[in-house]
Amino acid sequence: MIQGVRRFELVLIGALALSAPSLVQALTGGVGLTTALVHVALALALAWGVGAVLERTIDTYARQARQRELHARLERVRGARGLTASRGDLPGPERD
């Protein structure tokens, strides 16, 4: 399922850019108004889908980069304190 996008204005600009030739032709009488509106609706659906896919892809890579950065920081702190990466070696209450 395609989810919404956070930056709808970019989707709208993309849809208008895609359907601009059809809108110009509608204003000059080259195509009918209904045809131009159908082109705008299709361009909006296409721009929405592409925007949602791009947003999800960027979010996924950004989340992975944040996780790698946090992991690297934790490893630096553990190394500076002389701790190993093992969970059992962390200071805390006794574990059974």
Image (cartoon, rainbow, N blue to C red):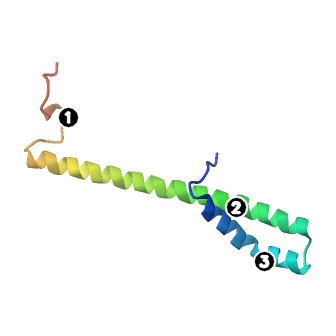
Question: Residue at coordinates 61% horizontally, 64% vertically from top-left?
Answer: 10
Seen in the image, is 27 located left or right of residue 10?
right
Instruction: Write down the residue under mark 2.
Output: 46
Q: Quarter of the image containing the N terminus?
A: top right
Q: Residue furthest left?
A: 82
Q: Which element type, helix, strand or loop, lies under badge 1?
A: helix
Q: Residue at x 85, y 69 (%)?
A: 36
Q: Report crowding for label 1: few under 14, some 14 to 19, many 20 or more residues within 10 A (C-alpha).
A: few
Q: Nearer the viewer, residue 41 or 50?
A: 41
Q: Quadrant of the C terminus?
A: top left
Instruction: Inspect the image, locate mark 1, and give the three-letter code of the amino acid beneath it.
Output: Arg
Q: CA distance from mark 3 to mark 2?
A: 16 Å
Looking at the rendered structure, the secondary structure element under dot 2 is helix
Q: Depth check: give the residue in front, 32 or 73.
A: 32
Specify the amino acid type for callout 3.
Pro
| In the image, residue 5 above or below residue 93 | below
Question: What residue is rendered at 11% in x and 41% in y?
Answer: 83
Location of residue 27 (image quadrant): bottom right
Residue 21 - label:
3
Q: Amino acid at mark 2?
A: Leu
Q: Find disc 1 in the rendering and name its residue.
A: 87
Q: Position of residue 77 (x, y in %)?
A: 15, 48
Nearest to viewer (mark 1 / mark 3): 3
Label 1, label 3: how far apart the Cα atoms are: 61 Å
Of the image marks 1 and 2, the number of the one nearer the N terminus: 2
Residue 93 in picture, x, y percent from top left: 14, 24
Dot 3 crowding, Cα within 10 Å, few <14, some 14–19, many 20+: few
Going 14% across and 45% down the picture, which residue do you hit? 78
Would residue 10 appear left or right of 78 to someone viewing this image?
Answer: right
Q: Which mark lies nearer to you, 1 or 2?
A: 2
